[in-house]
Amino acid sequence: NLQPLNMPNRLLLGPGPSNVHPAILAAMNTPPVGHLDPTFLNLMDEVRSQLQYVWQTDNQMTIAVSGTGTAAMEATIANSVEPGDIVLIGVMGYFGNRLVDMAGRYGADVRTITKPWGQVFSLDDLKTAIETHRPRILALVHAETSTGARQPMEGVGELCQKYGILLLIDTVTSLGGVPIFLDEWGVDLAYSCSQKGLACPPGASPLTMSARAMEKLQNRSSKVANWYLDVNLLGKYWGSERVYHHTAPINMYYALRESLRLITEEGIENCWQRHQKNVEYLWESLEGLGLTMHVEKEYRLPTLTTVCIPPGIDGKAIARRLLDEYNVEIGGGLGELAGKVWRVGLMGYNSRPESVDNLVEVLRQVLPK
Ligand code: PLP
């Protein structure tokens, strides 16, 4: 016989999920209504307008996909790529490679531009690659969770518009914690997740498409090769038609609404500033322990920091001790950075000085003197 659920209460300072805000957990405790209940349809409209605010966009097609960040990632690819389209993807870490794999599966003629993990692309890098490959879509990861690097977006949209290219960006580790100005930047497609900067559990993932991206979708010659993620169909559920598409995970949308309400109450600019302030405190504190960061300061993310594992130290064993002995989770390196860095997330509700103090205190205990 199974015992009642008894999970540990961890401080989640890895690359996500991060801890869920108590007010969000409380909101999730509300009994679900039906997915076509007028009160739920109204909640969907509220989620749309609050997502427009946190992303700084007026895109009418701003929704949440029922699924994790990867589902929203796949939705942007499925709805923008037609077989044979040249898609240029910036790869500077693990998630750029995931986009490459995905776009290829939807029939894209994928071209890549690469940087060593931890670095970012300059406008000149992107311009040269665009002129070489003449893509229909440029895809970039704004916040590369595997490296902790922030891809600057200023000027990229203008470049894309000049060449008639759609700009697609991954904001999974930036939404709610790193300044994003989708419309000002000229971004056409973006996606995110719920379990990082939004401080929800994983499961309902924001997605947005500009009028230009919607025009390409409406003029395609083939059907979107993914029924569940077809924005033509999803749009009829989120739009005025209210046509049944799938049974929305109602309580996840309660979570999302509460998260967005909290961010709006704080003010998105204040929220960005809080993340920046707390991460600077983290960097200083880690330096105080003799540790160094992997990414150059200018390009570091406020939400996720890669910390170099000092020579001679078993990074995995240290992370395991933090978890087992202190209930603190940090992440290990992914892909090329496996064994070389720890990944420390300070996102959403966890972006607080207490999180930093707690981590530094336990690291002091476990790191060799
Ligand atoms: N893109 C980036 C940059 C990520 O960090 C992640 C997850 O960490 C994903 C996509 C995939 O999101 P999920 O794991 O929620 O499916």
Image (cartoon, rainbow, N blue to C red):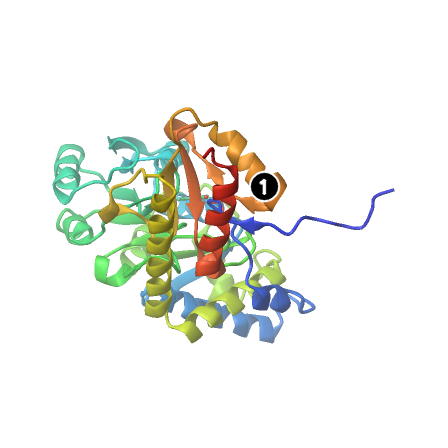
Place residue 34 in its image quadrant: bottom right
Image quadrant containing the C terminus: top left
Picture coordinates of residue 66 (x, y %)? Answer: 54, 53
Q: Does 27 sit above or below residue 136?
A: below
On the question of residue 84 being in view, the answer is yes
Left or right of 79 on screen, residue 259: right
In the rendered structure, which amino acid carries the disc numbered 1? Leu
On the question of residue 352 being in view, the answer is no
Q: Is mark 1 within 8 Å of ligand 1?
A: no
The residue positioned farthest toward the top in the image shown: 312
Q: Nearer the viewer, residue 299 or 310?
A: 310
Q: Does 111 sit above or below residue 243?
A: above
Residue at image position (54%, 44%) is 329
Residue at image position (42%, 52%) is 192
Left or right of 200 on screen, residue 63: left
Q: Nearer the viewer, residue 259 or 238?
A: 259
Residue marked by disc 1 = 323
The residue positioned farthest toward the front in the image shown: 369
Picture coordinates of residue 278 (x, y %)? Answer: 38, 58
Picture coordinates of residue 255 (x, y %)? Answer: 56, 64
Residue at image position (40%, 35%) is 98
Q: Secondary structure at mark 1?
A: helix
Q: Nearer the viewer, residue 204 or 311?
A: 311
Indicate the quadrant of ligand 1 in the picture.
top left
Mark 1: give few (<14), some (14-19) or many (20+) Cα within 10 Å.
some
Left or right of 81 on screen, residue 65: right
